[in-house]
Image (cartoon, coloured by chain):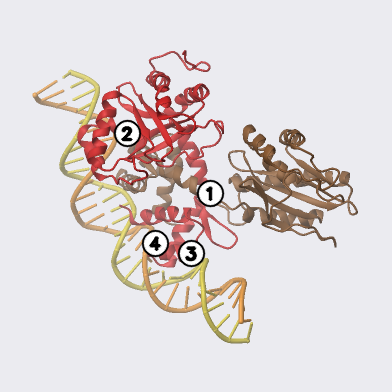
Chain colours: A red, B brown, C yellow, D orange
Amino acid sequence: MSQTVDRALSILPLLAEGPANLEQVARRLDVHKSTALRLLRTLHEHGFVYRQQDQRYRLGARLFALAQQAVESLDVREIAHPHLVALNERCGHTVHLAVLEDNEVLYIDKVDSRYPVRMYSRIGKPVAITVAAVAKLLLADLPEPERRAVAERLDYPSYTARSTPNAAAFLKELATVRAQGWATDLGGHEESINCVGAPVRGVDGRVVAACSISAPNVVVSAEELLHLLPLLRRTADAISAEYSGNTTPPMNSPKEKA
Amino acid sequence: MSQTVDRALSILPLLAEGPANLEQVARRLDVHKSTALRLLRTLHEHGFVYRQQDQRYRLGARLFALAQQAVESLDVREIAHPHLVALNERCGHTVHLAVLEDNEVLYIDKVDSRYPVRMYSRIGKPVAITVAAVAKLLLADLPEPERRAVAERLDYPSYTARSTPNAAAFLKELATVRAQGWATDLGGHEESINCVGAPVRGVDGRVVAACSISAPNVVVSAEELLHLLPLLRRTADAISAEYSGNTTPPMNSPKEKA
DNA sequence: GGTGGCATTGCAGCATGTGCAACTTCCATT
DNA sequence: AATGGAAGTTGCACATGCTGCAATGCCACC
């Protein structure tokens, strides 16, 4: 809507691909060099862009700081985290937390069995929305018309032979997920990887996030993974309860009983 | 320099403090509501801003994705180089910068000694991973299981009598290095050459690179080399700071509001 | 010392962003 | 229901401030 800002913001993803000099930026934006220069200067003043010795521009540190703050301000994540850690300790597999934002599903937290807690490694990347268990859970909760609209609008990449092929199949799957209250992704994204997911709900019962357990075939079969469903659902419910304020305070490790 | 972009970008740190509605944003920017609305719309289209159910604005997902890509393209070497040169000017010895890549430690930069001695190192070549100071620093930062796995997998060539003999000794050494935050190689690779190394850390505190000072016995004793440790560590810390964006780079610094 | 590539500057013209005021929507209150 | 207020949204006339051009500066490489 605002041409100038629109152009300026377009520079950022462009630079994310790698450093670029003024002329390259100008050409990609299809504007005059002087225009690009002014935009870059403004971005630079705000620290979104950094200029290296060879005068090429690259993304600046301010982005990290902002992304960091943004992820920290997600309160679901904060509440969920200890539960996810506990779940990971119980089952040993990778645990994800995801939310829906503007028709994209993104991971906002992850606990990996091998790399405990660490930085936000893959966090922030959009997930394969047509196949991921967490995506199904989040979309299944949308009101019918919107769900249909989204399903219609999506692409259905064939990651594997078991990927969701089209909108019709996806809507059917969403209906199933909605009814049963949990979801799976059995080799739909990567042939050898299975997931089970469960929804986190807010006070009003709407799905605000979804968490999942992922594990490769070679470690546990899909069937064995499903045995973890009760544990997963208890975790998701515990997060829901705490998020809605319906339960006892955080205290220490909210571990669950077998 | 560009008013519109300047205003738009100012919105982001503002939202980083927490969600805000249109009027609050307009007031903070000191512009009319309609102006703020248009800026926010543009930010929204680019995914930098997200609108929650209560219509308040929040930082959006695109920030995560960008920060992610940016960190991948960050080149430590470019940032580190001037620091390494400065260090070399101060101490006169050979200075190295190394990173870990696919279980190999690679020198990615080197400033040669001003003394007439040659060192057998080449940029891009793998280093003697079981003895080099930089290798110890990089491996010491790995999560425990992986560290162990790597140590187990390595060969332990006896370059000299003081080379690391086996996995057990190596792991013990790594534990020491991890604890003290610096490392040495005292004649472990070449009988007459000693090194001290210090880690370069990224925003998340993980070791992303390591730099070292190397010098032959005939020029300085091991003990004298250790006297350079404080200088080395200051250098490494300066690189870390700049790499993490915690400090302003030499010349082109973002503007300061005075 | 010339040449080419790229960044930078100053400027005139007008596209584009701006603020205003009217309109809508929603919700709380009577 | 009706009323009032608070917040978001829209259309528009004005002029600010953005745009592209052309000229200049800067460097590195022949």
Residue closest to the eye, B93 or B102: B102
Say which amino acid is labelled 4: Leu
Crowdedness of circle 1 by 10 Å Cα count: few (<14), some, many (20+)? Answer: few
* Residue pictured at 67% horizontal, 34% vertical: B148
Crowdedness of circle 2 by 10 Å Cα count: few (<14), some, many (20+)? Answer: many
Q: Nearer the viewer, mark 1 or mark 2?
A: 2
Say which amino acid is labelled 3: Leu
As drawn, the label of residue A136 is 2
- Residue A181 occupies which quadrant of the picture? top left
- Cα distance in 3D space between marks 3 and 2: 43 Å
Q: Nearer the viewer, mark 4 or mark 1?
A: 1
Side of B215 relative to B12 (left or right): right
Q: Position of residue B151 (x, y in %)?
A: 69, 38
Give the residue pinned by disc 1: B72
Crowdedness of circle 4 by 10 Å Cα count: few (<14), some, many (20+)? Answer: some
Give the residue pinned by disc 4: A29
Q: Do the residues indicated by labels 3 and 1 lie within the same chain of the protein?
A: no
Q: Nearer the viewer, mark 4 or mark 2?
A: 2
Q: What element does badge 1 sit on?
A: helix
- Residue C30 occupies which quadrant of the picture? top left
Subunit bearing disc 1: B
Vertical relation: B216 (above or below) A185 = below
Which circle's residue, 3 or 4, is located before the other in the chain? 3
Subunit bearing disc 3: A
Q: Do the residues indicated by labels 3 and 4 lie within the same chain of the protein?
A: yes
Which circle's residue, 4 or 2, is located before the other in the chain? 4
- Cα distance in 3D space between marks 1 and 2: 29 Å
Subunit bearing disc 4: A
Residue closest to the eye, B237 or B37: B237
Vertical relation: B161 (above or below) A44 = above
- Residue A237 occupies which quadrant of the picture? top left
